[in-house]
Amino acid sequence: MTRVLQTIAWATLVVAFAGCGSPTGPTSGTIRFDDGTPVTAGSIEFRRQSDQQRFASRIAATGSFAPTDQQGEIGLPPGSYEVVVVQIVMTEDLAKEAHRHGQTVPRRYADYYTSDLTVEIAENEQTPIELVIESQPEH
C-alpha cells in the first residue's frame, strides 16, 4: 500500500510540474506595409529588452510568421521587445525591377537602433502579433 501511495504522489508531482516552463505568449503574427500589402519575404527578429534573448522567424508570402527561441520553442514570453525586419536584396535597383518578393522593406527596419518597432507582450497574451511598417518611398 505504501508503494502505491508513493507512486501516486510521484505521478502527481510530475503532472504538477509538467507545465512549469516559461509561459509563452503569441505563437504567430503578421506583418504588412501601411498600404495594406503583406511583407512577403524576409526575416523578423524580436529582442527582449530585459535579457536580450532573441526570437526569430522567416516571413511567409502571406506576411505571417511564428517566432521561435534558439531551442525551437514557438512563442514570445511576456515582456518588452525591440523588433527588426530584414530582407536580403542585391541592390535597390535590382530589387525594384527584378524581384518577386513584393515591396522592399526600408533599410531602417533592419537595425535595432533605427527600427523603432516595439512589441509589448502581457502575461497570458495569446492574440497574434500584428505589425505595420512604412512602405518604401518611390524615387
Image (spheres, helix red, strand yellow):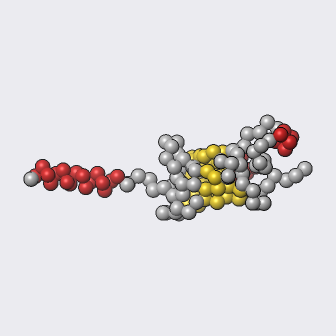
Q: Position of residue 9 (x, y in %)?
A: 20, 54
Identify the residue at the far right of this view. Answer: 139
Tell me the residue at 81%/52% (across/down): 136
Identify the residue at the far left of this view. Answer: 1
Q: Is residue 139 visible?
A: yes
Q: Position of residue 106 (x, y in %)?
A: 78, 49
Q: Is residue 116 visible?
A: no
Q: Position of residue 119 (x, y in %)?
A: 61, 58
Q: Tell me the quarter of the picture where residue 87 sits.
A: top right
Q: Position of residue 2 (x, y in %)?
A: 10, 52
Tell me the residue at 51%/58% (across/down): 25
Horizontal side of residue 95 vs 52, given as left or right: right
Tell me the residue at 56%/63% (across/down): 127
Q: Is residue 105 above or below residue 79?
A: above
Front one among 112 and 83: 83
Q: Is residue 47 above or below residue 94?
A: below
Q: Tell me the quarter of the picture where residue 94 sits.
A: top right
Front one among 102 and 93: 102
Tell me the residue at 67%/52% (across/down): 63
Total marks placed:
0
Front one among 45 and 93: 93
